[in-house]
Each structure stands twice: as C-alpha cells, then as structure tokens.
Amino acid sequence: MVLKVGIVGAGASGLVTLKYLLEAHKFFPGVNIEAHLFERGDDLGGVFKNQVYEDAELVSSKYLTAFSDFRIPEYEPDFVTPQRYVEYLKAYATRFDLWDGIHFSTTVASISPSADGQHVLKLVDLQGQHVSTYSCDAIAVCSGLNQDPFIPNIAGLTVPLQTRDRKEHGHHTSDEKPENVSIHPTIEAIHSVNFKSRSQFGCDTTVLVMGAGETAMDVAHLAITSPTERVIMCHRDGFIHAPKIVPQPYRAGGRSGGPDPSRPNKPLDCAVASLFDTAYVPSIIQRSPLPWAVYDAFIKDMAWVISGTRAGFDQWVGGVSWERFHADSLLICKSDRAMHYISEQYRSQSTINKWRTWLLNMELKPTGGKKIELAPWPLHVDESGVVHFEKNNRPESVKIVREEEIKPDIVVFATGYKQSFPFLPANASLSYPSLNDSTTRGIYRNIEDGIAYIGFIRPAFGAIPPVAEIQAQHWIYHLLVCPKFRHLHSPSFKPLGRSANAVDPYELDYKLKCRDKDHDYQFTKRAVDQESYIYQLALDMGSAPTWTYVFKELGREVFFTWAMGPNFPTKFRLGGGDTVDE
C-alpha cells in the first residue's frame, strides 16, 4: 500500500514538504509515500522568483533561512539576493532528488472529495486545454502568502470619488494583474507585485508609496535614489523598525567603535539565546506576561541607548501608537535602507541627545540632503489630482497638511496580499477546513481531514522557510501515526516511541497579542513569536532534546551553540525521528 500526497505550490514551503514526504521512509520504517508537487509556474521559487525588484535582498539571514540539512555556502553574504536563494532551492531539489516529483506549468484547478475518502485534484496546463486528475490521500497546501495583491479603496484613485463615504476597505487585482490600477487620468498607480526597477519612477516625479512594511521601505529607498523630485511614504498607524545586523555603535564622538567591514557583526535574527528564553523556561513563567515585558523593555531601552529614541532603532517618526506599542503585538520591519532618509529631518537636537550621541550612537548613514517624507493615509484624491490626507496629531501629519497641494505622479501600493484558494470548493466549509479553521498549531484542523496549510504562519521576527520546515515535519509525523492512514503502511510499521532524551511536552504562549482590534496580527496574519512557535512544534513531536543529552552526547561545543543560538530547525534534528548525521 502507498500513502499518496499532493502538494500545491513550488515555493520554499512546498519544496521542503516534498522532501520530507519522500524521505519519510528513512526515519519511519514500513512507510511508503508517493508525493507529487504541482506548480502553475515554470520554475521553483514562488515569491522569490516572481515578485523580485531591483537591488532586492532577503531580510532574514542565510543562517536562519536555509533548511536544516542543506546550508547556504559560507562564501555567500549573510543576506542573499532572491535570485541566489532560488538557485539554492534548485540545488536543494537536486541534492535530495526532488525534480521527478515536481510538475511545472500545471495548475490545480480544483480539489474535491471522492466517494472513497480520497481527494481528487483536477490539473490543467497553462492553456487550460490538457486536463487530468490525481487522486491522493492527503494534500499539503503550500501556495504561499503572497499570491493575491491587495489594493485598498482610495476614492478618486482606485475607486470613484462618490464611494469615499462607503465602508469599502479594498479589492483584489485580477489574475492578469493589470499594472495601472489608477482611475485618475494624471496618476499612474501600481501594486508592488508589478514594480521591478527604478526606471519605472521616471524623472522629476512625485512618488507616493503606500505602506510601511519591508517592501514599502525598499521601494521608497529605490525612489529616493532615483532622479525623482519627491518621495512620500504613507502609513496607517506607524511601524517599528529594527536593523538586520546587530548595530556596532560609535563611542566618544566616533573616536572608537563603529562597524568594521573586515569583521561585520552577526545578523539580528541570530542574536537570540534559546536556553532559558524558550527552552527550560517554566511553563507558568513562559505563559505569563513576564517574558514579553522583558523583551519589550529590552528592545525599547536598547533602541534609546544607541539611537536616542524608543520608537525603533534611529526611528524618530512614524512610531506605532502608544495603545499597541508593545513587543507582544508587533511585526518588526527589518528593511533599514530607507530609515536614515526618513529620520534625519526629525532627529532630536536637544542637549541631552547630543551628549548621548557623543557617548554612544549607532552609525548614521549619509543622505546627501535627500529625504523621504512620511504622511498619514490618504482619504481621497480630488479631480485635480491633489491628495487629501487624514489629519492627526503626529508630527508628519501636522507637517504634510500645511501644504496646499500634493500631486503624485506615481503611486506604488506596497499594501500586501490576501490569501485565496481558488482550487478549493466555494462551499469549502462543507468539505474542507479553511485556513482559519486550521487551529491545530495553525497547520490543520483535524489530522484525519488529510489537508494541511504549510507556510502560512507569519513570524513577528524571523523567516517563513524554517517555520515551514518544522510545520512539514509536524504534519507528516502526525499523518503517519494517524489511525485513519495506518492501513496504507506496511504491517511492519510501528510508530516511534517518544525518546527518553526529549523534553516532556507542555504548552507555550507563542501567539501575538491583540492590543488594538484594528491591528490584530494573530487573527489577520496568524502572527507568532517564531522562537516559541518552533519550540512548541518540536515539543509536540518529541524532537526537542534535553540539555543533558546535548551536553553529554554531543559535546561542549555543540552544547554552547545549541544554548546560545536561536531555534534553528537543525537543533531539533539532533535526536528523535528526524535525526541526521550531517
């Protein structure tokens, strides 16, 4: 007998899921799995292949982003380009012989249940002419977070002026993704999915960037380093910024300290020591407000010490509103290319800050006199092309509303995406659990459903590929031991018992909190603290090793690395079902 599994999407999440399915027999004797991955595009990579713009680089480091058993080479920079990451994914597919299981230019048009309890995938080619089906026992949905561009409704720009008083929040672009979504004759508006290079800004133009996330920061930086006249970035309720690399502050007015090109500091996403942060923290403490309070104070105080502001690192404007300004409810923006163009005009000139800057301050990069302005969210655009902004008490709002008119030439919507699953039945609730129904660690509803969503959890600070790897392990493990699918295994199959070297399972508090109903990232984005979430999945599987096992069996050097590093997936392959010697 064979357990058949279909996978939708050939991004990082789909690829790592395919790999663990095809190699499950190595770790679970008696298991025989047939897995096929279907990708509508003509290559691997997903968002890293299709939604790339000039000068882009990953905001998560190569140490965190790489999979546990196939590292990105040491000679590569700490933050690789999307193109290089796609090459890495291809090398990964070659290393583990995955190519034969991948079917490109194949769209999963629909998924429906069959009478015998299987799932039937209707497959079509790019022209929609060749139709075939694939019947399987389980499905892994790995179609990704960034598939359906979201365009907010702005009266006079994306919807008629007459609709500005209606409660319409946004719409999606069509499958063809038309580049210009503006209805105003003098303004060009595109979603960031269609933005590729500086040349799209033109010369002497006013550019309006909608959004304040990592893509918005990158687009704003490309705009200000182009021959544009003015760059304005609009946000709804602020953002919090942290650099990708641990800052190396200057001391004594620059006489010592500062970045050393020959010895760059470590990436910030590698700076967490997991021992006594997630590992071996008593449950009663870990689930209390205390850890979040400590993180919150540390982040804000450290930002003030080395940059003079608690809103973010060298972030003097655009901070998150006080009501929700707490580490337990925020998504961190790790793109720092635009920050110095934003902050220079707002940095404090007080005597206290001048003294603090002389004593200790992070590097302040030159701007050449250029600046990126911040503005509140637009209310509407009138017939003459003037943008009318929301009014509030923020300094950027007070500054921008003083001007009589701002007429953008180009608007770039860096406003994210909304998930859609067109291959699932319209009445999916009757046959398949939705993404929001998948409440078991955000992966599946009930393991007997045979459907999982891999790669749809959003880390507050981290990267999706390592999360997807642990999710794939978690789902496959529970799929294999599920009684419903036991008849598909060999009679010799026996579920592995929990190792004596594994930490006993317990519940962690890994979900972000809601401090403002309009910014509930746990609900809208399934946002989590990556360290706690990955450790929770490892505890569930019995793959979180005890400190005594790591110290006694693997040695002091491995123990130090295990204790003082973040929760890389590699740490959970030191013992248990997915143990590797590499």
Image (spheres, rainbow, N blue to C red):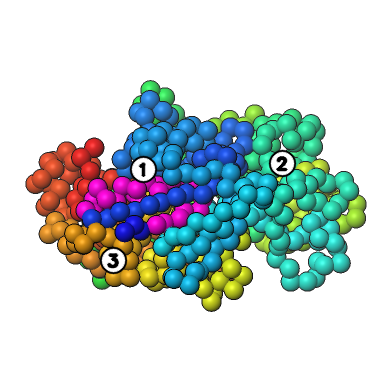
- In the image shown, does 491 or 211 lie closer to the viewer? 491
Pointer 2 residue: 231
Pointer 1 residue: 67
> Few, some or many C-alpha atoms within 10 Å of disc 1 (few <14, some 14-19, many ≥20)?
many
Pointer 3 residue: 486
- In the image shown, does 191 or 267 lie closer to the viewer? 191
* Marks 3 and 1, the one that precedes in the sequence: 1
Instruction: Please indicate, yes or no, whether residue 295 appears anywhere in the rendered image.
Output: no
**Element marked by disc 3:** helix
What span is in magenta?
4-29
Residue 239 painted magenta: no
Residue 17 painted magenta: yes
For image coordinates 31% across by 62% down, the residue present is: 488
The image position of residue 210, as x and y in percent, is 68, 51
Which of the 4 image quadrants contains residue 540?
A: bottom left
For image coordinates 50% across by 69% down, the residue present is: 113
Which of the 4 image quadrants contains residue 215?
A: top right
The image position of residue 183, as x and y in percent, is 84, 53
Which of the 4 image quadrants contains residue 409?
A: top right
Kind of residue at badge 1: Phe
The image position of residue 392, as x and y in percent, is 69, 62
Please state, as top left, top right, bottom left or bottom right, where the C terminus lies in the image: top left
- In the image shown, does 577 or 133 lie closer to the viewer? 133
Q: CA distance from mark 2 to mark 1?
A: 38 Å
Q: CA distance from mark 3 to mark 2?
A: 60 Å
For image coordinates 45% across by 35% down, the residue present is: 90
